[in-house]
Image (spheres, coloured by chain):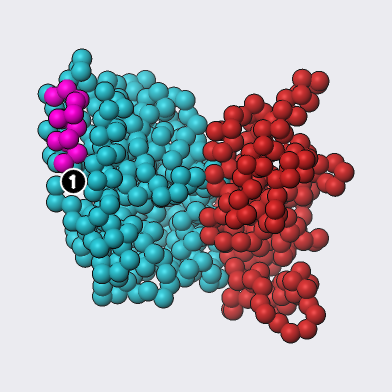
Amino acid sequence: MSDVAGSHDDRPHARDGVLTRRSFFKGAGVVAAGGLVGEAVHAAAHSMSLEPVRLSGEVEIELSINGALQKLKVEPRTTLLNALRNHCNPPLTGAKLVCDRGSCGACTVHLDGQPVYSCMTLAVACVGRAVTTIEGLGAPGQLNEVQQAFCEHDASMCGFCTPGFVMSISACLERKPDATLDEIKHACAGNLCRCGTYPHVFDAALSAGRALRAKGGKR
Amino acid sequence: MRAFDWIQPKTLDQVLELLPGPRDTKQRDRVKLLAGGQDLLGELKEYLVQPEQVVDLKSLPGLAALEFAADGGITISALVTLAALESSAELRTRSPMIAEAAGSVASVQIRNQGTVGGNLCQRPRCWYYRREQALCIKKGGAECFAYGGLNKYNAILGGGPSYIVHPSDLAPALVAAGASAVIRGKKGERRIELERFFTLPSEGSVLRENVLAPDELLLRVEVPPQTGWRSTYLKFRERSSYDFALSAVALALKLDGGTVREARIVLGGVAPIPWRADKAEAALVGKKIDDASCKQAAELALVGAEALQYNGYKIPLTQALITKALRKLS
């Protein structure tokens, strides 16, 4: 079995022709899945049985993503990030592949409400848990308070790290809408921004906290 | 990463059945245990281990308990997350040093998934070890490339033939608290002092950092009552947002008035194991914390330290951290 479907299958490669990055990835995903011979084990494998669950080759799992159950074909080695970006329909590309080693935070999603690095999480280990991505926090026209504040405070430059920061800050403010600047810095210490827009990010986070508190007061 | 079978056992016995025999060191990497995965996934991605089976421990019952006994003791099961330790108000009261160490590990995202067992059993961060193409002594090669190479982050104490540093923050704090490790293997349970859990490259196998046999796993850590002890964990990082320790000090003191009755000083980031500074501990007993006793303790703690080409800064840095920790607790 080649590595095509592994952690490398979402790496961009230089190619001739007019493939976009996105369509190339989708194509690569389909080819990889089609070329694999594996037993299809269904989500029933994660039942209440007292026997060990054993998954091998290409398997079908069911994940709760942004509140909806979705069936995905993955391998045991498929990371949650890879599953979201390349195995979901439609692809959820808000979480970004950058370092792929749990060092930069661009792939941050929530697992049962807690921020985690989706690049350092196996998709098969997320069965039965609630996965929330940036797409699940808000939508154009219905942004959550943190997303709205990022727009108002011009808190992104290239924007690649932004979804990760929004996920980390949203989780922090969810628990503590009156988080201090130090607490916000601690909450997103695992997110890196190579453009250096940290001051705007922190302004946005403090502003989002105020907005959440105002909303809470009106309830 | 290479393809593997993913197995999620429901009982500890099922885990033990999957592990190789106690002396079957050649089969050791055929099966890898997955807890939070924050270290293992990096190793898989770099092809440092290529297991046939990855055994997910997360659904085992009873391994995620953090318990506080009435006598002051603390039981920390292997699957307790670092986030759970960091956020436990009771732990922060009973042993500030352990809570501070847990909170200093990596980032929120890693602490949410990373476990105590995984943190104590994590593999070295030396960049030669982590590079797939470098067949260093930790991976069965002939030499430690850090020794004559780029060794800014390597050991100043206890090095040779490998000069890795143990990357755990929790380990120095738990050793300073006098914790024990409870280990389970095919033949049953055993308990050892956590200090004896870690092995120098010159003592145990140079390929390993602890005493676990191929059929064993760490079940829990038991911390004796910390009544009467003051403690703190100070960590110095190159990058303040989050990083491994360049040097760290876990310090616990039992004070009577201003006089030290007992002291524990365990250093992180400077040796292949959490490094107990026993000469410095002994010298502090019966003394007040002042300029003279701080200076003496800092000097004694680094006796025997040997700088490699690029890590000499660790000696004064560690001495300064020890002094700062002593001042903080006095």
Residue A42 in view of the camera: no
Q: Residue at x 59, y 75 (%)?
A: A3
Q: Residue at x 69, y 67 (%)?
A: A40
> On screen, B197 above or below A170?
below
Q: Quadrant of residue B318?
A: top left
State yes or no: residue B297 in magenta: yes
Q: Main secondary structure of the magenta part?
A: helix
Residue B45 in view of the camera: yes
Q: Nearer the viewer, residue A53 or A110?
A: A110
How packed mark 1 is, by other alpha carbons closer than 10 Å (few <14, some 14-19, many 20 or more), is many
Dot 1: what SS?
loop
Question: What span is colored magenta in the figure?
Answer: B287-299
Q: Nearer the viewer, residue B262 or B218?
A: B262
User: Horizontal and vertical percent for residue B287?
Assistant: 13, 24
Q: Nearer the viewer, residue A65 or B325?
A: B325
> On screen, B295 above or below B127?
above
**What residue is disc 1 on?**
B302
Letter of the chain shown red in the rendering = A
Query: Farthest residue in the bottom direction?
Result: A16
Letter of the chain shown cyan in the rendering = B
Q: Residue at x 81, y 41 (%)?
A: A143
Position of A76 with respect to B179 (left or right) is: right
